[in-house]
Image (tube, rainbow, N blue to C red):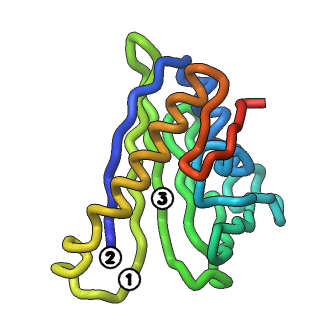
Amino acid sequence: MLTMKNQVDINCPLEKVFNFLSNPENFPKWNYYLRSVRKIAEGNPIIGATYHQQRIKDEHYFTISAYEENKLIEFNSTGGSLLKFKRRLNFAATNDGCTIKDIFEIRTFLPSFINKLIAKKPEAAVKQNLLKLKELLETGETVLQDGRRVSVK
């Protein structure tokens, strides 16, 4: 298992940040590696909702597996995905906005010592995406690593 842990402070109200991230269709606005995310099946009403994400080189399916308003969202890959992952976003209010703790686990079938060796590059890429999220929510727009200019709207 490859586990990446990051944290980012965002100077926006917790509710605004949570609402933005609780809609996975917003993910391509802050993650340059994602080309599109679209909802393909309803959940109950949120947990169980299924999404398809098109990345630069592949595609995956995932569901919302846990949800507590303004506290946490968890996403899990589904059986139709080659990449098996779980991503948990924990939210906490701060004086200036909120903090997001991001725990991203990818099943690799590699020995743990190799996972530790290869974790730094993807963990840094995830952190860069979170910093783009911060900029997007604090200013209303950002330029992603691939040159795309995106806005909150």
Q: CA distance from mark 3 to mark 1?
A: 15 Å
Label 3 vs 1, first from the N-terminus = 3
Asked if the residue at tag 1 contacts the one at tag 2, i.e. Cβ–Cβ closer than 8 Å, the answer is: yes
Q: Position of residue 106 (x, y in %)?
A: 42, 72
Looking at numbered disc 3 in the image, what kind of residue is underneath it? Arg
**Residue corresponding to mark 1:** 108
Residue 12 appears in which quarter of the rendering?
A: top right
In the picture as drawn, the residue positioned furthest to the front comes out as 147
Q: Earlier in the sequence, mark 3 or mark 2?
A: 2
Residue 87, numbered label: 3
Amino acid type of the residue tagged 1 in the rendering: Thr
Residue that appears at 58% across and 85% down? 82
Rendering coords of residue 84 (x, y %): 51, 77
Q: Which residue is mark 2?
A: 1
Helix, strand or loop under label 1: loop
The image shows residue 100 at horizontal and vertical percentages of 43, 36
In the image, 56: left or right of 130? right
Residue under the point 35% across and 88% down: 109
Q: Is residue 13 left or right of residue 127?
A: right
Q: Is 92 or 110 nearer to us in this picture? A: 110
- The quadrant the N terminus occupies is bottom left
Which residue type carries mark 2?
Answer: Met
- Judged by depth in the image, the label closer to the viewer, 3 or 1, is 1
Which of these two is toward me, 15 or 37? 37
**Residue at far left of view:** 113
